[in-house]
Each structure stands twice: as C-alpha cells, then as structure tokens.
C-alpha cells in the first residue's frame, strides 16, 4: 500500500505531517507520488481561507483517481461539512494513534499523538511541538476551535526528543506552540534553560510568543542561553488599542513597545519579526495610521501582513467586514513598503560582519541559508554544504536578504 501526504498551513501542520508519515509507515504504507498512491492524506488549515480553497481544487483529481482519502489537521466544523463530501474519512489529528482502528471499527488504544516519533523530513532542521491548542480566543482566530484548549507536553518527552535529534546531528530545532509563553507545568524560560543544557551543537528557535505574557525571565533566558538564537517572532497584529480590543488581544500598544524596547536593550542586534492584520472589521484610516506609526517605531526586520478574511465560528465572523478589498490591499502595500525600508536600513549596519550561516539549499552555483539571527543569505559557491553551519562575510545588503562570501 502506498500513501501521499499533502500539507497546508503553519509549521505545526508540517510537524504533524511528520508524525502522520511515521504512523502510516509503521503500519506498512510506503510514501509515493500522488499519482501512485492508494491513500491520500490532506492536512488542512482552516485558519486561512486560501488553504481551504486549494483543497476544494483537489476534488476533481480525487474523483478521477478513485483513491481512498483522509482529511485531518486544523479543520473548522463548517469547512469539514463542505469538504467531507469528497473525502472518505475526516479524522482528528489527536486520534492519529488510532486512525486505522477507527476506520476498521476496532478497539482503540490510549496514546497521545505527540508521543509518536516523527519521520523527520530534514536531516539538519526539525520542529518539536511543546504544546498544542490555544486558550486566547483572539476574535479573528480559528485555532482554539480546531485544536482545542492548550495542552503541554511533558518536560521529559520534550528533552528526550531533543536529545535524540542532537545525537543525530540536527543543527536547528524549532520549538512550536500557538503561544509558547503559556507552556506549563514549568515556566517557558525554565524549559529553555533545560534545553540549553542538552549536549550537542545546535540552535534553538521558537514560535510564537504572545505579548500578553512575554516575561522578563524569558528575555533573560534568551540572553543567557548559548543555544537560543537572537531571533524573536513578536506579533503586534494592530498598532491601535481600539482594534486590539476588538481583536481580544489583551495588551496595549504602549505595553507592547515597552516590552520590545526591553528586548532590544537586553539582546542588542536581535532579529524581530511580527504579524499584522490589515482591514480588520471597523478599522478606520486613523486606526490604520496608528499601525503605521508602530511599524516605523519598531523598525522590524521582517513582518507577515495578512488581509483580514472572516473565519467561521470566530467572533470576528459576526462582525461587519466593512473594509474594502482595495483598502486592505493598499494597507498591506504600505506596511510592506515600510518593512522593506527598515529591513534594508537594519541590514546595511551589518555589512562586513562575519556570521554563522546554516545552509539549507543549493541551486546551481549558489548556496542559500540563514544566519543564527535568522537573516537570509545567498552565497556564490559550488560546494555542497547543505546542512552545515559555515562562516560567511556579509558583502551586499538588500531588503530581507544579503549576499555573502565563505570565510
């Protein structure tokens, strides 16, 4: 029997995909192309309408192939009701250890799906979920409805997985959680310190951090732990207090900027990325201009701008989507232009610096990778260095990237 996995969405979905592959191959399935597969598994993401639309585009292919299909991942009930007409099974990712038992109506076992050892897709970088679900209920977000409330993995399980990865020579490990700051039973900062003591030469990154509970202890741990990279994804979502309140984001712009100031002072040169939503219901020009002010003041290195689209079951779905698509597009462009300028200005300050770079791609005469502080670098070289950490001198600066040369 052969299977093919199609994954949409965030890093968590891709991490889940590695466990799906491990489970199926443990049951005797072999990975194959979509054309040769007897079973196709689609890991969906209801957080983005575009991802759901792409799944609808698979219906014709499924009917032509007459292949067995499973839908899983982050799937809202409303999306599930529409999609299940051309899927044989809609299965909860949390039930992964029992998928075949559920399909064959056999007794199920009591096992947490995150305890399944993943079939890692990379030899040098890996994702390690430390928790799943979310308790925040941001008014625009579907995650609490598709993944449920927060559940943290045990410290022992996390350390065991990271120790295994370190022994295999993994160079970069991402800790994943919808809000890693909410990790329990110990503070997230304490978990980082424990991970930092694991033997091996590897980098640790994590995502995502909610501003409402990013603590001084976490900032200090980032500074003091050698393996923790000077990179932080720190979502603002909006630079206006009124919009933040409608989004159910329980912090003010002032609090956010004070935390950001403290981070930059404690960890000089740290790479900061953010998320922002433009065109949230009721967002006025004045409110948007406040977001512009924050972007200019924060001087982000990178940002991910999303044009608001209503998701079923969320509170924002009941709000009037009264910002035109044209205004959303224009606001997206304005923030992106600011990001390009601040990124270039930040990058120029680093010209001539020597950085460690993890090479993740080779294309012709060029290597591509990221510095420890998460900056993109292109290097002219025919050497096969994928998966290695090398020293590179930054010689040309652009928005969001550099050109460098091997040292």
Image (tube, rainbow, N blue to C red):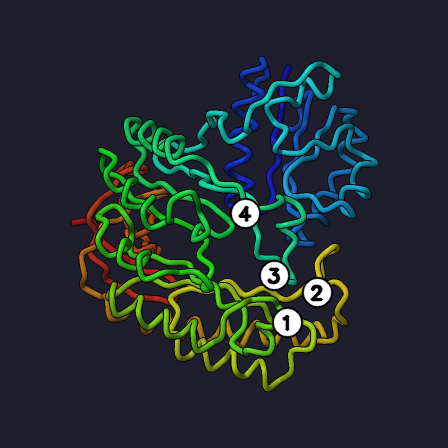
Q: Which residue occupies 48% across, 75% down?
A: 337
Residue found farthest to the right:
85
Report the front residue among 320 and 197.
197
Q: Name the residue under label 1.
A: 246
Compute the Cα span from label 4 to label 2.
21 Å
Q: Residue furthest bottom?
A: 286
Front-lying residue, 360 or 182: 182
Instruction: Tell me if label 2 and label 1 are in contact, CB under 8 Å.
Output: yes
Q: Label 3's element?
A: loop
Q: Which of 355 and 185 is in front in this view?
A: 185
Disc 4 designates what residue? 10
| Residues marked 4 and 3 touching at CB (< 8 Å) | no
Residue name at image x 38 percent, y 36 percent: 155
Q: Is residue 335 left or right of residue 393?
A: right
Q: Is mark 4 on a helix, strand or loop?
A: loop
**Mark 4 against mark 1, which lies toward the viewer?**
1
Q: Which of marks 4 and 2 is in front?
A: 2
Where does the image place residue 172, in percent across and percent down from the top left? 33, 41
Residue 59 x, y percent position in the rendering: 78, 38
Q: Residue at x 60, y 71 (%)?
A: 278
Q: Where is residue 240 in the image (x, y as percent from the top left)?
A: 54, 78
Q: Distance between the residues labelled 4 and 1?
A: 24 Å
Depth-wise, is mark 4 or mark 3 nearer the camera?
3
Mark 1 falls on what kind of element?
helix
**Mark closest to the chain's N terminus, 4 or 2:** 4
């Amino acid at each position: 029997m052969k299977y093919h996995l199609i994954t949409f969405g965030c890093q968590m979905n891709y991490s889940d995909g590695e466990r799906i592959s491990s489970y199926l191959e443990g049951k005797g399935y072999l990975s194959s192309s979509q054309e040769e597969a007897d079973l196709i598994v689609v890991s969906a993401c209801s957080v983005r309408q575009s991802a759901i639309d792409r799944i609808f585009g698979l219906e014709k292919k499924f009917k032509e192939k007459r292949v067995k299909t499973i839908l899983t991942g982050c799937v809202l009930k409303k999306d599930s009701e529409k999609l299940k007409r051309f899927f044989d099974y809609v299965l909860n990712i949390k039930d992964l250890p029992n998928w075949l038992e559920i399909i064959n109506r056999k007794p199920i076992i009591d096992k947490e799906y995150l305890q399944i050892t993943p079939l890692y897709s990379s030899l040098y970088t890996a994702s390690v979920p430390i928790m799943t679900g979310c308790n925040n209920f941001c008014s625009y977000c579907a995650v609490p409805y598709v993944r449920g409330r927060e559940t943290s993995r045990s410290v022992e399980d996390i350390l065991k997985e990271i120790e295994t990865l370190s022994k295999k020579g993994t160079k970069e490990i991402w800790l994943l959680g919808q809000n890693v700051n909410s990790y329990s039973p110990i503070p997230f900062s304490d978990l980082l310190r424990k991970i930092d003591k694991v033997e091996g030469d590897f980098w640790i990154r994590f995502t995502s951090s909610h501003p409402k509970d990013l603590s001084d202890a976490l900032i200090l741990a980032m500074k003091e732990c050698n393996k923790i990279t000077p990179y932080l994804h720190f979502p603002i979502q909006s630079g206006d207090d009124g919009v933040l309140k409608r989004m159910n984001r329980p912090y003010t712009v002032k609090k956010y900027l004070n935390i950001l100031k403290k981070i930059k002072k404690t960890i000089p040169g740290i790479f900061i990325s953010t998320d922002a939503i433009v065109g949230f219901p009721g967002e006025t020009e004045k409110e948007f201009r406040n977001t512009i002010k924050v972007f200019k003041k924060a001087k982000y290195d990178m940002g991910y701008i999303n044009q608001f689209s209503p998701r079923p079951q969320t509170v924002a779905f009941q709000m009037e989507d009264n910002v035109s698509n044209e205004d959303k597009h224009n606001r997206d462009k304005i923030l992106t232009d600011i990001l390009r300028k601040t990124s270039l200005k930040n990058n120029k300050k680093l010209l001539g610096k020597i950085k460690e770079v993890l090479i993740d791609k080779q294309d012709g005469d060029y290597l591509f990778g990221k510095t420890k502080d998460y900056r993109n670098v292109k290097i002219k070289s025919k050497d096969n260095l994928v998966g290695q950490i090398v020293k590179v001198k930054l010689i040309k600066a652009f928005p969001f990237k550099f050109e460098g040369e091997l040292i």
